[in-house]
Image: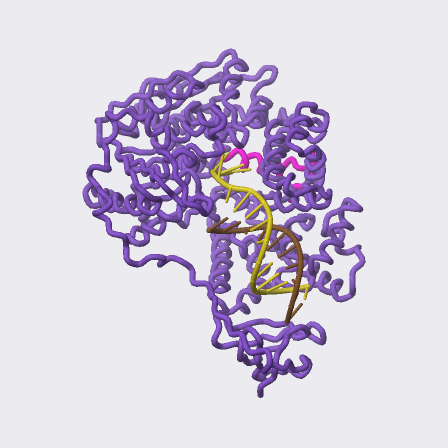
Chain colours: A purple, B yellow, C brown
Amino acid sequence: MSDYLKELNEVQRQAVMHLDGPLMVIAGPGSGKTRVLTYRVSYLIDSGIAPWEILALTFTNKAAREMKNRIGGVVGSKANYVWAGTFHSIFARILRVEAEKIGYTSNFTIYDTDDTRSLLSEIIKDMKLDKKIYSVGNVRTRISSAKSNVISPLIYAKSDELLSQDQANNMPMLYKIYEKYVARCHRAGAMDFDDLLYQLFKLLYLNKEGVREKYQRIFRYILVDEFQDTNYLQYSILKLLVKYEGSEENICVVGDDAQSIYAFRGATLQNIFDFQSDFNQLRTYKLEQNYRSTLHIVNAANSVITHNKKQINKDLWTRQQEGQKIKLIRAMTDTEEGRRVADTILELKNRNHLVNTDIAILYRTNAQSRIFEEFLRRSNIPYVVFGGLSFYQRKEIKDMIAYMRLAVNPHDDEALRRVINYPKRGIGQSSMNKIINYANEHEISFWDSIGKVELGSRTLNAIKSFYQIIIDIRRKAESTDAYLTTSYASKRSGIIDHLKSQNSIEGLSRLENVNSLLDGVKEFVENDEEIEGQIQEDKKLATYLQHISLLTDMDDNKKTGDYVSLMSTHSAKGLEFKAVFVVGLEENMFPSYLSLSSPDQIEEERRLFYVAITRAEQYLILSYCNTRYHFGQIRHNDPSRFLEEISEDNLEDFNALRTPKNFPEPKVLGFFQKHPDTRRLDLDPVDFIASPSDQIEVGMHVLHMKFGKGEVKRIDGNRDKKVATIYFDGINNPEKRIMLKFAKLQITE
DNA sequence: GGGGGCTATGGGGGG
DNA sequence: CATAGCCCCC
């Protein structure tokens, strides 16, 4: 027997060595699920199955990366040829190759949530619908959910059930918005996140040129991680790949119904039940031994989850020692909660010799991170917040990427909308509206429309220069690699100059971010970075864009070093820490107030709590407060119902040991508040006589009603378009750019 | 065309 | 409380 098989327990080994036919592994938290998955892939390869015949799907890049690394550890470089990656990235890769078969081209853009929102908002406006009723968020969710259930606009429009639901929600036109949205995405050569699944389904279902059989042949063995989080669409795709005449049905799904926490994006446990009936030859393995957590933690987790009615019977057990009891922090206010969590972290580090990376703070919503950040800073504890704005969501980075997206696919309407007038080149909203209207009338992209729509000569010149910028970047992209193209784009677009000209700290930090983007692209080009298990020979821009559009904040590999991790309970899934704080355990927070009205949603919140506490290996600390600021008001909440579901035997009442009086209020209050520039230099209007603007020249000293005394540093533009750069000392951000045509300035010398 | 300031609105989890 | 959208002024 190979060495790695000896590392497994009996059930794990059976699951790993089950070669042919369908199997389902129900794996409790900490039961060695990843080990089973990776060893199974290794075992398949050792048994003579070619690595490129194996498809292993995960939900996060992190999980995929870990799996690949661990397979690599067992079978070496062969691991690189396994199709291992997220549903989205693997499917995107297939779609690039097969795009023509579903009416796309291989250079299609991936629209992120912001792109989707901005497009929907335009459609809603264009249809003259009330945007309070048709809120972009609701509409987007509805459309996303339709796609996740394999409902095309056509089917949607014919479904009495969906139409009457929309009628009841006062949104009868939703089907029409959906139809327009799909048409607009197609016109722009764009797919949103749901499309990466939906279009792949379409591709396989339509089976043009036998493309379905092609992939059925390629993927002889399929493995799916976190199966409980798949939606109907994902399961439908899996069935198209493995359920066919003469199929060996080599599919292995791994999951845990108790950890299903993504119903809000369409995940359904029905898939687990359907799987059992869809595959007659199915063997099921249950991994119930927990290797991660101490007995107190395992007992607490078991006790909590029994309060759910809907679950597959499973008994999590451990051979680990009792360990420390679970601590409970009861705080009066959210501030006190933050302080005591920070203090407890210091204590854990001192008494139990934990390092920062051993520790995580988990909260229900990302907005809760702020207070903990504040107190960690005061205590000099380094930390990283995951799940906030990712690097690629920063404004300056999105601007850069928009130029590159346009170079790859000029019909990308959302990228064009974003940068046609950034940096400012005089193409304002009214011109843009003309472009949009023309494009919609003729059912062409904005790009095709800008050359045809009638505009004033000045705007036309601006558009010509924009057009040329894109063409130039495009040429560069065709002839060279992603790094040189990006570098060129940063200059040619005018973004670098624009940021430099801002002369502010903010502009400087944006400039730095653009530079880190360039570093990142350089790394991408130079390293033989593995993407989705394959070494990428293609260093072109299009490949790079696809790569980054599917990254999340959890994939930021620059976040290294010794820090405490702060993240939402959702992001924590699949991770483990020696010490875990689950904070904000109050009714209305955790469980969320949005879930209180539905028993099903409460059960999902409970599973989420179950996920949270099972992240802990040795120390679990739960905390809540009586009052907190929420939605700008002080609110009182009762302690979370989930706390009562833990047996007292596993709990240590932390409150008895620590009373608030040991923690005097810090003296520096409001230290982290921003200091807005509230000063105003209003002059007495009587003394002020504006000089004619055509008399103003470089070097003159002038007076401004609001900004006070200033010196004219520069004048750009001609005639009506003259813009003066004036340095007003005595105010924050002293450099102002003022349009002379409108400015009221008095020449003083 | 651009920017500042005011008002209204919504407020969860993620690829 | 944060942000988006709007209006008004320059």
The answer to whether A162 appears left or right of A616 in the picture is: right
In this picture, which residue range is highlighted in magenta?
A: A84-107
Say above or below: A580 vs A632: above
Residue A207 in view, yes or no? no
Of residue A634 and residue A579, the one placed in the foreground of this image is A634
Q: Position of residue A296 (x, y in %)?
A: 26, 27
The answer to whether A672 appears left or right of A282 in the picture is: left
Per the picture, the main secondary structure of the magenta-coloured stretch is: helix
Q: Position of residue A406 (x, y in %)?
A: 65, 52
Residue in the picture at 24% in, 51% down: A664
Of residue A303 and residue A242, the one placed in the foreground of this image is A303
Q: Position of residue A662 (x, y in %)?
A: 21, 47
Point out the image quarter for the C terminus of chain A.
bottom right
Of residue A463 and residue A643, the one placed in the foreground of this image is A643
The answer to whether A519 appears left or right of A452 in the picture is: left
Q: Quadrant of residue A312?
A: top left
Residue in the picture at 56% in, 83% down: A701
Residue in the picture at 46% in, 63% down: A676
Residue in the picture at 48% in, 73% down: A731
Check residue A437 for magenta coloring.
no
Point out the image quarter for the N terminus of chain A.
top left
